[in-house]
Image (cartoon, helix red, strand yellow):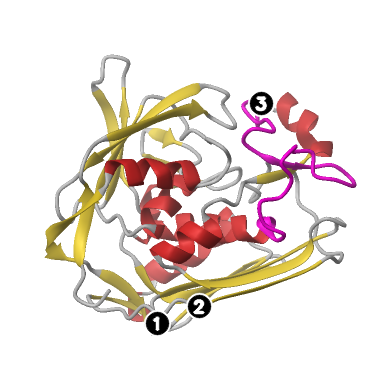
Amino acid sequence: MKGAKQTTLRDEVAVTGVGVHSGRNVTLSLLPADDDAGIVFQRVTADGSIERQVRADVRAVTATEFATVLGDAKGPLCSTAEHLLAALRGLHVDNVVVEIDGPEVPIMDGSAMPFVEALDQAGLTDRASPRRFIEVIKPVRAAIGDAFGELRPYEHGFRVEAEIAFDHPLIGKQDLAVDVTPDTFRNEIARARTFGFMKDVSKLWSAGYALGASLENTLVVSDDRVLNPEGLRFADEFVRHKVLDAIGDLALAGLPLIGAYKTVRGGHKLNNAVLTALMANTAAWRVVEAPVERPRVRGHAELAVGVPAAAFGPDVS
């Protein structure tokens, strides 16, 4: 990636789907953008008029309990942005306008792969300006209860190391470490789906959440089995989705990161806390133009007891 140019889309592309929490049908369009535009979300009305727009960076995060929500002083603009953000950052899309006609990015199949396929359909093109990066030069750490996350210097590009522990016989302890490149994202991470537990569904429905959740867009686990007919896409799909979420949440740095992120029992709230701590400490990062990419992937899954979490609730998507 040394000397790489910024990218945008060659053509416009659109997807439609349902919001996992709102249950509403949504159309989302991805449009080319100019150099240094970054990722911009635009809420549009039924006639296509632009209602509001926000640039996707950490200052635009308004909530992290059930998903990553972006907005401004007027309130939320769109929810559940993390899977789309992960696809954009994972495939090295620097500049794009995201138009959305509803309150939530469609969940699609619960993974980032439908967005990867949409980006492949649109195609990417280089811009004239060089790509810029935020390089982590000092470690930054945050903790929430027994969960913690840390960004540290890493000279080989962007790396995510995730550990999870659930008191469930089908999940247990899992960990994965991956150097994030377009190839590793596409092959190792993008297809991992959001997951939840069947025992908590009725409680969330009664609270007005997970109204669009189904076996078509969520990996659902009962006490002793996976309820989705196709089963797991990876033996450790749960931790792979945590990596996917982390990539999406850290895309809100505003520029690609050069650094390694470690998350233990974390989720959206923790990812946001670590990124906020990084951006607040200007001595811990600098803007540069030259990473070296050396992809490496390793992982491990161990079925053991750990810390439980609620289905479709905080930090599960």
- Residue situated in front as seen by the camera: 242 or 59: 242
Query: Residue most toward the top?
Result: 47
Residue range of the region highlighted in magenta in the rendering: 209-238
Asked if residue 221 is positioned above or below residue 23 in the image, the reply reads below
Q: Is residue 97 visible?
A: yes
Give the left or right position of residue 208, taking residue 197 as reference: left
Asked if residue 171 is positioned above or below residue 298 in the image, the reply reads above
Secondary structure of the residue carrying tag 3 is: loop
Using the numbered discs, state the Cα–Cα distance from disc 1 to disc 3 in whole angstroms: 43 Å
Give the left or right position of residue 184, taking residue 119 as reference: right
Tell me if residue 228 is in the magenta stretch.
Answer: yes
Mark 3 residue type:
Gly
Q: Position of residue 140 (x, y in %)?
A: 48, 77
Asked if residue 195 is positioned above or below residue 104 in the image, the reply reads below
Quadrant in the picture for the N terminus = bottom left
Using the numbered discs, state the Cα–Cα distance from disc 2 to disc 1 in whole angstroms: 10 Å
Secondary structure of the residue carrying tag 2 is: loop
Mark 2 residue type:
Arg
Q: Are marks 2 and 1 in contact (CB under 8 Å)?
A: yes
Among numbered discs 2 and 1, the one appearing first in the sequence: 1
Q: Position of residue 166 (x, y in %)?
A: 79, 59
